Image: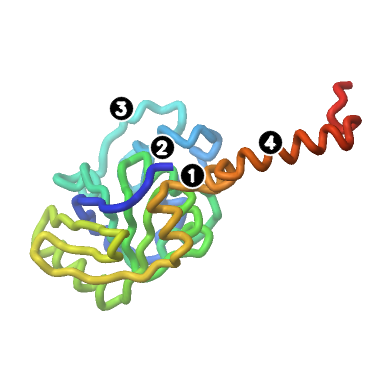
Amino acid sequence: MQAFTIHDGIVAPLDRANVDTDAIIPKQYLKSIRRTGFGPHLFDDWRYLDAGGLDVDVATRRENPDFVLNTEPYRDASILLARENFGCGSSREHAVWALEDFGIRCVIAPSFADIFYNNCFKNGVLPIALPAETVDALFAAAEARRGLEARVDLVEQRIGLDDGTACDFEIDAYRRKNMLEGLDDIGLTLQHADAIRAFEARRAGEKPWIFREL
């Protein structure tokens, strides 16, 4: 998993509440478990005017010119600003895969659905929950300055805008440490690889029948 320390990027304002995971990545894309290639299908039903699927070439589809990520400079956005209850709905991890594959490293909102929030930390996307009034101020700044840029500093737990304003955010210390070090569940397990190998070797000596090939 890619570590997150300090990230500079364009803020894309998605002024919608209760954005569910089916909107983030529709159900027809769940057939693939490759974890990559979902970026072109992020917010698929909102980004395109015609139907899509794994067997449909994105290049042949018509974009919705009114959707924020189809406009400049937001095609290159890496920070997503949204309203409350972002990531609600089903528990599909594909939703975070799609965000990450598009290039989104951070999502800022007043609140998140619990499973989506946890999946973000497992895939290197930083979810930041801020008070509603702070999010309102960020939306106002993004409206006043198209292409607003921000620095998200996980080390100092601070968001700084290119207009000079800043705000702090809270995050669980354990999750913060893992994000800073780029450790997902597999990475955490591999930190104990030597102990695991030693245990298996000892177990093979004590109970060899378990390891006997049939």
Q: Is residue 44 visible?
A: no
Asked whether disc 1 touches disc 2, contact meaning CB atoms under 8 Å apart, the reply is: yes
Element at badge 2?
loop
Q: Which mark sits nearer the N-terminus, 1 or 2?
A: 2
Distance, label 1 to label 3, CA atoms, is: 23 Å
What amino acid type should be assigned to the residue bearing mark 3?
Thr
Q: Where is mark 2, residue-wise? A: 38
Distance, label 2 to label 3, CA atoms, is: 16 Å
Q: Tell me the number on the disc at residue 60.
A: 3
Quadrant position of residue 150: bottom left
Distance, label 4 to label 2, CA atoms, is: 35 Å
Q: Nearer the viewer, mark 2 or mark 3?
A: 2
Q: Which mark sits nearer the N-terminus, 4 or 2?
A: 2
Q: Residues within 10 Å of mark 2 (few under 14, many from 20)?
A: many
Distance, label 4 to label 3, CA atoms, is: 50 Å
What amino acid type should be assigned to the residue bearing mark 2?
Phe
37 vs 106, nearest the viewer: 106
Which residue is located at x 31 percent, y 76 percent?
Answer: 132
Q: Where is mark 4, residue-wise? A: 197
Asked whether disc 4 touches disc 3, contact meaning CB atoms under 8 Å apart, the reply is: no
